[in-house]
Amino acid sequence: MSNTDEQLIIKEEDGKKVSPVLPAHLKNYLVDIDGTICEDIPNEEPERMVSALVTPDAAETINKWYNEGHIITFFTSRTTEHRKVTEEWLKKNGFKYHTLLVGKPRGGNYCWIDNAPVEVMPMKENFWKLNLNMNKPIGFKLPASL
């Protein structure tokens, strides 16, 4: 894990500092765990987390992004009680990352509201293979007029 703050660009508006940003060529990837990089395991069955099956090509794609300098944050609905088993599983399966955030709200139907640009990359069949082979994200961007 590396210090991501070193990559941030300091910004000012009207003589006041505002939130820093990454250079345009870098992304902040927020990646779910269950059902995304491994089989979907509910919090009610934590005994399955230690041996979860890795989604094919997920580690290779995420590690490629990490090696290119992108920021990798796992953002999961797993709880604080699941942190240790999750960190051990990520290490055992060779995932490179900067941060693990637990406690994401459960249930899906997420609506992200932010003053920063947000790119959505919904999971589809062969998602990781497509991203690994195409070397670019798939998904969509919201129109700037919204």
Image: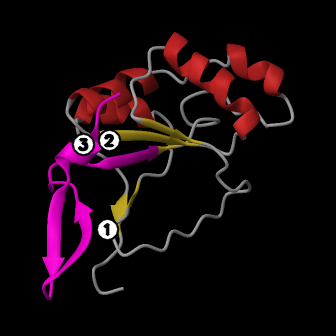
Q: Amino acid at mark 3?
A: Lys
- Residue at 69% over, 56% down: 105
11 lies above or below 120: below
Q: Is residue 72 left or right of residue 69?
A: right
Q: Are marks 2 and 3 in contact (CB under 8 Å)?
A: no
Depth check, front residue: 95 or 40: 95
Instruction: Write down the residue under mark 3.
Output: 136
12 lies above or below 95: below
Residue 130: which disc?
none
Q: Secondary structure at mark 1?
A: loop
Q: CA distance from mark 2 to mark 1?
A: 15 Å
Say whether disc 2 or disc 3 marks the residue closer to the N-terminus.
Answer: 2
Question: Is-magenta flag for residue 27?
Answer: yes
Residue 21, position as x, y percentages in the image: 23, 61
Quarter of the figure with the N terminus: top left
- Residue at 26% over, 47% down: 5
Quarter of the figure with the C terminus: bottom left
Q: CA distance from mark 2 to mark 3?
A: 15 Å
Residue 127, position as x, y percentages in the image: 43, 37
Query: Of circles 2 and 3, which is in front?
Result: 2
Instruction: Write down the residue under mark 2.
Output: 71
Q: Identify the magenta region.
A: 1-30
Residue 7, position as x, y percentages in the image: 18, 46
125 lies above or below 85: below
Residue 117: which disc?
1
